[in-house]
Image (cartoon, grey):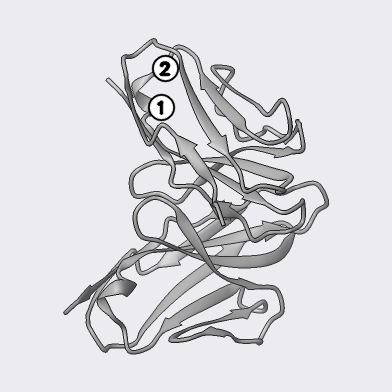
């Protein structure tokens, strides 16, 4: 059974700090890893990572995949209160016809002003 | 443009009742997914449609759960004889096509079974 583990489960930091969120996975057939931000109910897409070692960046957020270590990190620099959310990691299987995303439990990030 | 919409946003029902949850995907998206998210957990896959057909329903927990997408657009998730354990947020997502893994999620329906 595919498994995705995220750490820490929750994190509280002050505005301006830099945070690193972790995601590790055990899957039978790996294609891609996705990061989502969930503020209320709808997760919003952040990044899709397929190739190891290539950093994806969007503003203050960046993410990188390490296929050898079966893991990914999401970095947020100069955090703002609007970054407070649950960050979800999901893996995408590679076998054709299997579209089932497997999500981790998420990291709840709280930014204190 | 319009995103994925779901109705109702909240539904409270009594144990044993039947409920229907609706999802309206982004126009032109052929792939549609249903997930269930319990408190403190990540979304859990239920079923995936490619067009009108259910391509993978392996995540449906039991035969009380059923979903349809008769015209390849709007989908309805149906739950019979609801149980308290069915209480969760039901999320719908759509993507342009199979293999297009950037799934766009709707705001979800919070189902509470009393």
User: Who's the residue at 75% across and 47% down the image?
Assistant: A98
Picture coordinates of residue A53, whole percent (x, y) = 66, 87
Compared to B21, does A92 lie above or below?
A: below
Q: As rendered, which of A65 and B37 lies closer to the eye?
A: B37
Compared to A59, does B2 lie above or below?
A: above
Q: Which mark is residue B86?
A: 1
Q: As rendered, which of B8 and B62 lies closer to the eye?
A: B8
Look at the numbered disc 2 and give the secondary structure of its residue: loop
Picture coordinates of residue A99, whole percent (x, y) = 71, 49
Report whether residue A15 is seen.
yes
Give the spatial CA distance, label 1 vs label 2. 7 Å
Q: Quadrant of the C terminus of chain A?
A: bottom left
Task: Count all numbered tags in the image, as a single digit.
Answer: 2
Look at the numbered disc 1 and give the secondary structure of its residue: helix
Mark 2: few, some, or many residues within 10 Å (few <14, many ≥20)? many
Picture coordinates of residue B37, whole percent (x, y) = 43, 43
Compared to B57, does B114 lie above or below?
A: above
Q: Are marks 1 and 2 in contact (CB under 8 Å)?
A: yes
User: Who's the residue at 80% across and 46% down the image?
Assistant: A97
Q: Which residue occupies the extreme front position in the image? A: B1
Picture coordinates of residue B29, whole percent (x, y) = 70, 48
Q: Which mark is residue B82?
A: 2
Mark 1 — on which chain does it sit?
A: B
Quick check: A75 left or right of B76? left
């Amino acid at each position: 059974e595919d498994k995705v583990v995220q750490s820490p489960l929750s994190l509280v930091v002050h505005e301006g700090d830099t945070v690193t969120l972790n995601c590790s996975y055990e899957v039978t057939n790996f294609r891609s890893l996705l990061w989502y931000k969930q503020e209320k109910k709808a997760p919003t897409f952040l990044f899709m990572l397929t190739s190891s070692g290539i950093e994806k960046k969007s503003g203050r957020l960046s993410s990188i995949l390490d296929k050898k270590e079966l893991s990914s990190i999401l970095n947020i620099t100069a955090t703002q209160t609007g970054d407070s959310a649950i960050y979800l990691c999901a893996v995408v299987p590679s076998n054709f016809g299997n579209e089932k995303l497997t999500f981790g439990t998420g990291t709840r990030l709280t930014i204190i002003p | 443009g319009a995103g994925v919409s779901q109705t109702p946003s909240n539904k409270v029902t009594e144990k044993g009742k039947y409920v229907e949850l609706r999802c309206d995907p982004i126009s032109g998206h052929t792939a549609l997914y249903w997930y269930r998210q319990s408190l403190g957990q990540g979304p859990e896959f239920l079923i995936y449609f490619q067009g009108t057909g259910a391509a993978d329903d392996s995540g449906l927990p039991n035969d009380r759960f059923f979903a349809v997408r008769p015209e390849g657009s709007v989908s309805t998730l149906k739950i019979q004889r609801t149980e308290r354990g069915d209480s969760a947020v039901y999320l719908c997502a759509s993507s342009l096509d199979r293999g297009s893994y950037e799934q766009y999620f709707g705001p979800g329906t919070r189902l509470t079974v009393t």
